[in-house]
Amino acid sequence: PRPADDEEAAEPDLEPEAMHGYAAFAGIVGTRLGELHVALAQPSDDPAFAPERATPAHVEGWCADAIASFEHALDVLGTRLDALDASSRAAADALLASRRDAVRALGKLVPRTLDAQCIRIHGDFHLGQVLDVQGDALLIDFEGEPARPLERRRAKSHPLRDVAGFLRSLSYVSATGQFTIEKAPAQAADRKRALFDRFGQAAADRFVECYRAAAEQAPVRFVDPRYTDRLLALFLIDKASYELCYEAANRPDWLSVPVGGLAALVERLLDHGAADDGESR
């Protein structure tokens, strides 16, 4: 076998090929999810599947749900600070300090008169709901989030909620992969940490690119393109908040993953000046 130093030196040569493969598959998933949403957006005589234009009440509900999830997550986080390492504790402290500004920004992120569509969606979309079948992606398990009542799982929502779920799943892959380098030498750890970050971003970019290309075939546009990124940010924060509560209750050793993810999302939200630029009610 080759010495460890040789393996470390040779490993970067494999990185572009491996990253391309992961990103390519993420793109296939994006295409298939977009095609699923296009199919679910077709006119239907069945009221349970007929697309609906989002009303101000729908949008208000999305914002209210995200704010409630976020505030609950911070309440939970405040009781778990002692379980975090120094880096995660700093992110947690920043989150707790941002509470008022973040809630205000979330409330103004999208206008209540947003031009958007509600359709049936997957409802619990993540990597575990995708099978790799001979290089293609098969989407499975359409029962929605098990913790939600059946009525909520059957309710129509915005397709970007599924997009947010998968993007958070990709972030989990990148973040949890970094658990494996905690005891690595500093130089190797830094390089691998950067590799995981690049993997996550490359896969996310390809997924979104392919999803958008497929979703353009829908009979109606899913959302006013001026607010696509803002609505996605709302759903991402909602999802990351749910993840934080889940990990705190079930896998406290993983709590650093959603803490870091939520902190980054909130920092981006505030840096973009959503509280000043977003339309109000």
Image: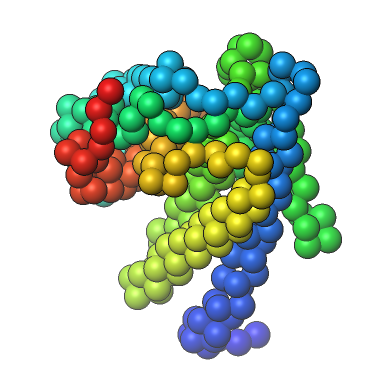
Looking at the image, residue 161 sits to the left or right of residue 38; the answer is left
Question: What residue lies at 66% left-to-right and 49% top-to-bottom?
Answer: 217
Could you say which is closer to the camera, residue 225 or residue 13?
225
Question: What residue lies at 55% left-to-right and 39% top-to-bottom?
Answer: 222
Which x, y percent locates residue 95? 24, 36
Which x, y percent locates residue 65? 41, 21
Question: What residue lies at 76% left-to-right and 26% top-to-bottom?
Answer: 44
Asked whether residue 43 is in view, the answer is yes
Please count the marks in the image.
0
Asked whether residue 253 is in view, the answer is no
User: Quick one: quadrant of the N terminus?
Assistant: bottom right
Q: Quadrant of residue 189?
A: bottom left
Looking at the image, residue 31 sits to the left or right of residue 116; the answer is right
Question: What residue lies at 61% left-to-right and 51% top-to-bottom?
Answer: 216
Looking at the image, residue 48 sits to the left or right of residue 220; the answer is right
Q: Quadrant of residue 104?
A: top left
Could you say which is closer to the camera, residue 10 or residue 111?
111
Vertical arrangement, residue 151 with respect to residue 205, above or below: above
Vertical arrangement, residue 177 with respect to residue 257, above or below: below
Could you say which is closer to the camera, residue 97 or residue 117?
117
- Which of the colour schemes (rainbow, by chain, secondary structure, one colour) is used? rainbow
Judged from this view, the residue extending furthest toward the right is 134
Vertical arrangement, residue 171 with respect to residue 251, above or below: below
User: Quick one: quadrant of the C terminus?
Assistant: top left
Which x, y percent locates residue 174? 48, 56
